[in-house]
Image: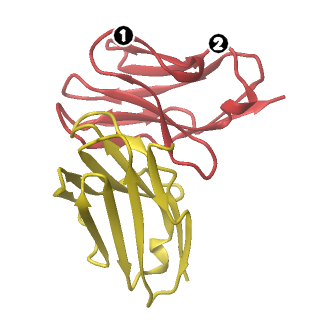
């Protein structure tokens, strides 16, 4: 798990707040991913970056805004979220696209 | 279209007995298949992967899986369960040839009884 780190591990925010999730990978990988894991549902792919370019936006609402300043860091900026956005947000990286993905520990987000 | 089915949502075994977690897949390509494990309040850890090399794949922590094309199965096994194996296990198939898109199963929660 130390290969991909995520901060914070837990976040409680109101619907009018703005916050950011951070992901950092120490594996020298070129691709990074954001997933949402909700109870009783399969993991949902949200965004994919390869060499800092976004290659996937899986119909994610605009209240989620990703940023990838370099191949080691990935952010997810959050604003005006809804209670149904409460979930575990997982970051992953892979050596290149289509290679096996390595996951971070996740950020448990609660929207009140 | 690709899909993956984990046949059991919950499995209970006694410590020291074998583990079998079942996974069936559907793919119009030669698939890449993975097993991941998720312990409570943790991220997903890659246990093993199949990418069209040997059909019997050995992973970490004593787990292995066998790719059976004729049965479209990729079951996960371990000869002897440990208490630390209690977790949720996900079978994953790649959505197509050379794609980063994973299709996740709904997970199997493994309980290990003392």
**Same chain? Circles 2 and 1:** yes
Q: Quadrant of residue B67?
A: top left
B89 vs A68: above or below = above
Question: Picture coordinates of residue A98 (x, y %)?
Answer: 23, 36
Name the colour assigned to chain A in the rendering: yellow
Residue ID at (26%, 25%): B31
Q: Nearer the viewer, residue B97 or A14?
A: A14
| Chain containing the residue with disc 2 | B
Distance from label 2 to label 1 (Cα)?
18 Å
The label number, if any, that marks residue B79 in the structure image: 2
The letter of the red chain is: B
Question: Picture coordinates of residue A53 (x, y %)?
Answer: 15, 57
Question: Picture coordinates of residue B12 (x, y %)?
Answer: 71, 31
Q: Quadrant of residue B33?
A: top left
| Chain containing the residue with disc 1 | B
Quadrant, the C terminus of chain A: bottom right
Check disc 1 and report the residue beneath it: B55
């Amino acid at each position: 798990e130390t290969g991909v780190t995520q901060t914070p591990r837990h976040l409680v925010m109101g619907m009018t707040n703005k916050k950011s999730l951070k992901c950092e990978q120490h594996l020298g990988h070129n691709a990074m991913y954001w997933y949402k894991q909700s109870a009783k549902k399969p993991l949902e792919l949200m965004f994919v970056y390869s060499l800092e370019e976004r290659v996937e936006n899986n119909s994610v609402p605009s209240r989620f805004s990703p940023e990838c300043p370099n191949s080691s860091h990935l952010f997810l900026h959050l604003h005006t979220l809804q209670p149904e956005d409460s979930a575990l947000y997982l970051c992953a990286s892979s050596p290149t696209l289509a290679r096996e993905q390595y996951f971070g520990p996740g950020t448990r987000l609660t929207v009140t | 279209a690709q899909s993956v089915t984990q046949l059991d949502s919950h499995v209970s075994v006694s410590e020291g007995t074998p583990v079998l977690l079942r996974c069936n897949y559907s793919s119009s390509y030669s698939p890449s298949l993975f097993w991941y494990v998720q312990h409570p309040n943790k991220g997903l850890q890659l246990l093993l992967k199949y990418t069209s090399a040997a059909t019997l794949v050995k992973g970490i922590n004593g787990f292995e899986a066998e790719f059976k094309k004729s049965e479209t199965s990729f079951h996960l096994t371990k000869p002897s369960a440990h208490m630390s194996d209690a977790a949720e296990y996900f079978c994953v198939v790649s959505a197509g040839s050379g794609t980063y898109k994973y299709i996740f199963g709904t997970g199997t929660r493994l309980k290990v009884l003392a």
